[in-house]
Image (cartoon, rainbow, N blue to C red):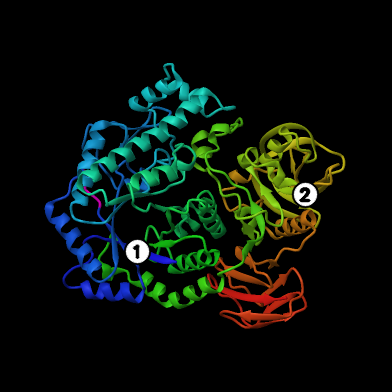
């Protein structure tokens, strides 16, 4: 896997140029994204373009590919606004509630497009081979708002619908209830606006050099709220005869940003988004190894290194965009990320080589982009919160409980959650599946017997403990839970008490066709917080036992009672490769990995140990954010 690094365009000076080059060479960096952001007037001095060209030429002459990375200038909103003041009379991004976002501009405004394209043309005139736009190439995910309802978008929505559509129509109807014409017009208009902006940029660059390719970094909303043809726009932007590039999303820094995620969530998000693109062999895909906001006081280098290692083991991405230069400060200010990368690189290369061949094995997570058009928005949802959380990587409900996952094949069994259940082919549940509350609701509505006789409501339930077959856990919660009249033959695995009434949180059930279901009645897309409802040792046991009960197979590997241990397994003709990635601040003491059967031989990549019956017993503990890889043979 290649490594690209973003660096500020002027971070290389006459005084440090060979020091920087030495770091790049030791880190085996293939490409540098020179970060070139115009000021709030969308203007840069000629001297700045000269520096961009000079440093691009310097790197190129030393066999390092260069790319110019700049904003889409639509704007980020929130913390990344950097106190941008409105300089122009451009049309500002407008939310469904009529709120404008200062310094965030609508890409349908012709004056805005004319101004940005002038800047992009000037950048292309420096001779850079590739121009990449940042992930502000999106409409929503700004200050928690859903956008855009400006005059241009409302006119476009009206044209699409064949009738006048107002902002009030969108606010009242588009994000409530079942699919409707207002939502359809919204989705098409947001995607069309981004496409038209991409077309304008491509035309402008073609006037300078048709061989200069253009790309963008993807945020989440283009795959969902914005209705964008992400792959199509990537190809359009690249230009005729040029290989498209697309950076997807995940980012190690989001591990604790807002205290909302496990590290497994970061990995499963990257893997899920790649699964949306797996047939696009003509595009180069980059993972998002982002360490924002930097320096290492805020985001440790170890997070990025284990992120890099897991995705190398997964073997899907072409390149990592690894943010190991603090491009808002002088190069010398933060070299710790670079030093960590250089130290980790020999083992990273070995991990990549070690996991070549074979097929990922685990529970299949079914995920689909662009499912907003068919979504049924339930009551009591706050659109801004719910919509900005999707598409949601439900897979971390499994991997966060140490269950290996796959996005590639049928898997050991299926995990179907949320609105993804509306799109899954029912052949995926030929033997049964693991479901969440929304998935169970939707499959019931599709005629699948998952143990529900009648759906009563899907509402928030508050409680102060959860009762399991193994015991009681004391914690408070207030989560959306599916409540129903259940089939008398379900086996209740856990429940909470709400207003003196027991509310089931997990059960298992075998229907008359012999299909087995493990159902968690809560809605996993709403479990953004680090909730005990989502991950605990009893839940871990429920999932592991449920997977093996449904499939009549053992998981390829499992490790118990070590939070956020990411297991990645690959099966070959006569062996099983296992990566045990400790994505948690505690060390794993006396590690024992339970396998699906007894194996005769073991080969370690970076540890030592022995096979004891169906277990691998390691000689050493696994430190926080470190990993062990081994291969066992039949």
Judge by depth and name the residue closer to the eye, 96 or 548. Answer: 548
Q: Residue furthest front?
A: 241
Q: Is residue 417 above or below residue 187?
A: below
Q: Residue at x 44, y 35 (%)?
A: 146
**Classed neighbour count for the residue bearing mark 2: other residues with Cα under 10 Å, few (<14), some (14–19), many (≥20):** some
Where residue 127 sits: x, y (%)?
20, 56
Q: Earlier in the sequence, mark 2 or mark 1?
A: 1
Label 2: which secondary element: loop
Percent across and percent down for residue 390 are 53, 42
Is residue 344 part of the magenta span, yes or no? no
Callouts 2 and 1 close, C-beta under 8 Å: no
Q: Which residue is mark 1?
A: 5
Crowding at label 1, few (<14), some or many (≥20) Cα neighbours within 10 Å? many
Would residue 92 be found to the left or right of residue 121 on screen? Answer: right
Q: Main secondary structure of the magenta part?
A: loop
Which label number is shown at residue 431? 2
Residue farthest toward the top in the current orientation of the protein: 163
The structure residue drawn at horizontal position 53% and vertical position 58%, both measured from the top left corner, is 267
Image check: 380 left or right of 234?
A: right
Answer yes or no: is residue 326 visible. no
Q: Is residue 591 above or below residue 533?
A: below
For the C terminus, the image quarter is: bottom right
Q: Quadrant of residue 8?
A: bottom left
| Magenta region, residue range | 37-41
Instruction: Identify the image quadrant of the N terminus.
Output: bottom left
Tell me how far mark 2 sits from mark 1, CA to CA: 45 Å
Q: Is residue 521 above or below residue 401?
A: above
Name the residue rendered at 63%, 66% in the picture. Answer: 569
Q: Position of residue 530 (x, y in %)?
A: 58, 53
Q: Is residue 373 visible?
A: yes
In this view, the mark in front (2 or 1)? 2
């Amino acid at each position: 896997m290649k490594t690209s690094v973003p660096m500020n365009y002027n971070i290389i000076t006459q005084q440090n140029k060979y020091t920087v080059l030495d770091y790049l060479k030791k880190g085996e960096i293939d490409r540098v994204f020179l970060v070139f952001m115009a000021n709030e007037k969308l203007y840069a001095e000629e001297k700045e373009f000269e520096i961009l060209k000079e440093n691009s030429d310097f790197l190129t002459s030393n066999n390092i590919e260069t790319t110019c990375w700049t904003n889409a200038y639509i704007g980020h909103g929130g913390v990344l606004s950097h106190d941008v003041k409105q300089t122009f009379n451009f049309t500002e991004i407008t939310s469904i509630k009529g709120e404008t976002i200062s310094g965030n501009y609508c890409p349908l405004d012709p004056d805005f497009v004319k101004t940005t394209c002038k800047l992009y043309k000037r950048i292309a005139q420096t001779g850079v081979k590739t121009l990449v736009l940042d992930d502000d190439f999106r409409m929503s995910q700004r200050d928690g708002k859903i956008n855009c309802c400006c005059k241009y978008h409302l006119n476009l929505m009206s044209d699409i619908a064949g009738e006048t559509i107002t902002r009030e129509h969108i606010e009242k109807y588009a994000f409530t209830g079942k699919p409707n014409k207002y939502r359809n017009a919204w989705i098409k208009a947001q995607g069309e606006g981004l496409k038209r902006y991409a077309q304008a940029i491509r035309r402008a660059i073609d006037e300078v050099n048709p061989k200069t390719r253009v790309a963008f970094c993807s945020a989440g909303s283009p795959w969902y709220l914005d209705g964008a043809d992400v792959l199509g726009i990537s190809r359009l932007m690249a230009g005729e005869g040029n290989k498209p590039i697309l950076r997807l999303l995940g980012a190690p820094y989001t591990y604790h940003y807002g205290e909302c995620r496990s590290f497994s969530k970061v990995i499963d998000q990257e893997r899920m988004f790649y699964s949306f693109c797996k047939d696009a062999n003509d595009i180069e895909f980059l993972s998002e190894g982002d360490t924002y906001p930097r320096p290492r006081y805020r985001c440790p280098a170890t997070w990025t290194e284990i992120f890099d290692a897991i995705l190398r083991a997964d073997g899907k991405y072409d390149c990592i965009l690894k943010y190991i230069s603090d491009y808002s400060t002088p190069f010398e200010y933060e070299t710790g990320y670079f030093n960590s990368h250089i130290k980790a690189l020999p083992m990273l290369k070995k991990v990549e080589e070690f996991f070549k061949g074979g097929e990922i094995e685990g529970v299949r997570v079914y995920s689909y982009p662009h499912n907003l058009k068919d979504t049924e928005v339930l009551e009591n949802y706050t659109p801004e919160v719910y919509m900005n959380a999707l598409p949601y990587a439900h897979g971390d409900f499994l991997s966060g409980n140490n269950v290996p996952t796959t996005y590639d094949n049928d898997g050991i069994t299926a995990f179907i959650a949320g609105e993804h259940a509306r799109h899954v082919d029912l052949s995926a549940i030929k033997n049964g599946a693991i479901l969440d509350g929304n998935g169970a609701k939707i499959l019931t509505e599709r005629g699948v017997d998952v143990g529900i006789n009648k759906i009563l409501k899907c509402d928030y339930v508050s409680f102060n403990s959860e009762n399991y077959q193994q015991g009681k856990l004391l914690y408070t919660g207030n989560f959306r839970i599916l409540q129903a009249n259940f089939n008398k033959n379900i086996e209740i695995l856990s429940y909470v008490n709400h207003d003196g009434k027991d509310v089931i949180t997990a059960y298992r059930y075998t229907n008359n066709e012999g299909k087995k279901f493990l159902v968690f009645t809560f809605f996993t897309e709403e479990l953004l917080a680090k909730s005990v409802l989502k991950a605990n040792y009893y839940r871990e046991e429920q999932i592991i036992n449920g997977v093996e009960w449904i499939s009549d197979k053992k998981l390829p590997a499992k490790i118990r009672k070590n939070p956020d241990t990411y297991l990645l397994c690959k099966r070959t003709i006569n062996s099983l490769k296992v990566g045990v990635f400790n994505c948690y601040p505690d060390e794993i003491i006396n590690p024992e990995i339970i396998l699906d059967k007894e194996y005769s031989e073991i080969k370690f990549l970076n540890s030592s140990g022995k096979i004891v019956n169906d277990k691998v017993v390691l000689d050493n503990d696994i430190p926080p954010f470190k990993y062990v890889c081994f291969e066992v043979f039949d």
